[in-house]
């Protein structure tokens, strides 16, 4: 748990990240061991490892952090959190950084600038069907954000269809109304904050 004296000396951005992350993310406990980056399946695609990103947060490098593609490449597998010797809530911090990047518009300068569009498409499908609809997600994303590249992914899609790894139509979950009630309540809580 962060001490008030330590937080008082920390840059404003560091304090803001901690305050915007639900619970206590233990960010101040990071010992820069690199276990997170070494554990991450998306690590090679990230501009900065989580360890580097946390050092940048501690240095108050707001714009550089919020323009980084690192949070957008986090696949939320939680493997980094499982392996972190200091129990830093790495995945939760990545979600916080995504929200901050969107709210402050910095994601537009990221090499992952299209990631919020992909995320919005994913969320829309989850809200409609209770789960992802991969064919619809990929099609919508490419037609909206990369229309000239849509033909390039067609062979991949055909291979997935041939192997029955992707559905042609979406399937709704049972009790979708309960999921919608949960999501509506989450929006209410978020709006109240």
Image: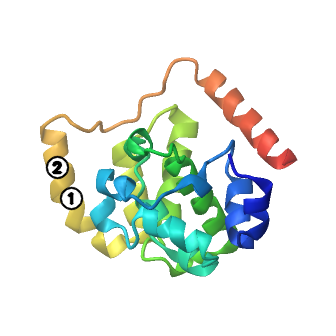
Q: In the rendered view, does 113 fall on the left or right side of 165?
A: right
Q: What element carries label 2?
A: helix
Q: Residue at x 46, y 58 (%)?
A: 118
Mark 1 residue crowding within 10 angstroms, few (<14) / some (14–19) / many (20+): few
Q: What element carries label 1?
A: helix
Figure quadrant of residue 160 = top left
Figure quadrant of residue 4 = bottom right
Closer to the camera in the image, 145 or 82: 82
Look at the picture and state if 113 lies above or below 118: below
Please give the label number shown on residue 154. 1
Expressed as whole percent of the image width and height from the top left, the position of residue 60 reads 64, 76
Q: Which residue lies furthest to the top in this view?
A: 174
Q: Which residue is drawn at 49% across and 23% down?
A: 173
Q: Which residue is drawn at 32% across and 61% down?
A: 43
Q: In this view of the protein, can residue 41 be seen by the observer?
A: no
Expressed as whole percent of the image width and height from the top left, the position of residue 28 reads 61, 57
Expressed as whole percent of the image width and height from the top left, the position of residue 150 reads 29, 66
**Cα separation between marks 1 and 2:** 6 Å
Please give the label number shown on residue 181. none
Image label count: 2
The N terminus: image quadrant: top right
Expressed as whole percent of the image width and height from the top left, the position of residue 92 reads 56, 48
Look at the picture and state if 150 lies above or below 173: below
Q: In this view of the protein, can residue 82 be seen by the observer?
A: yes
Q: In the rendered view, does 34 fall on the left or right side of 104?
A: left
- Marks 1 and 2 close (CB-CB < 8 Å): yes
How is this picture coloured?
rainbow
Closer to the camera in the image, 53 or 161: 53
Q: In the rendered view, does 38 fall on the left or right side of 19?
A: left
Please give the label number shown on residue 158. 2
């Amino acid at each position: 748990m962060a001490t008030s004296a330590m937080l008082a000396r920390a840059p404003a951005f560091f304090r803001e990240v901690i305050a915007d992350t639900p619970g206590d993310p233990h960010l101040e406990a990071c010992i820069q061991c690199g276990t997170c980056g070494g554990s991450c399946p998306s690590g090679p695609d990230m501009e900065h490892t989580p360890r580097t990103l946390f050092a940048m947060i501690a240095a108050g490098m707001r714009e550089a952090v919020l323009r980084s593609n690192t949070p957008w490449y986090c696949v939320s597998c939680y493997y980094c959190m499982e392996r972190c010797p200091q129990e830093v809530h790495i995945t939760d911090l990545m979600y916080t950084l995504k929200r901050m990047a969107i709210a402050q518009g910095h994601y537009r300068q990221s090499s992952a600038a299209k990631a919020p569009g992909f995320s919005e498409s994913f969320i829309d499908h989850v809200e409609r069907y209770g789960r992802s609809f991969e064919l619809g997600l990929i099609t919508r994303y490419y037609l909206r954000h990369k229309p000239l590249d849509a033909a390039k992914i067609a062979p991949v899609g055909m291979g997935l269809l041939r192997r029955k790894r992707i559905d042609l139509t979406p399937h709704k979950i049972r009790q979708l109304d309960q999921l919608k009630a949960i999501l509506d309540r989450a929006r209410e809580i978020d709006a109240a904050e």
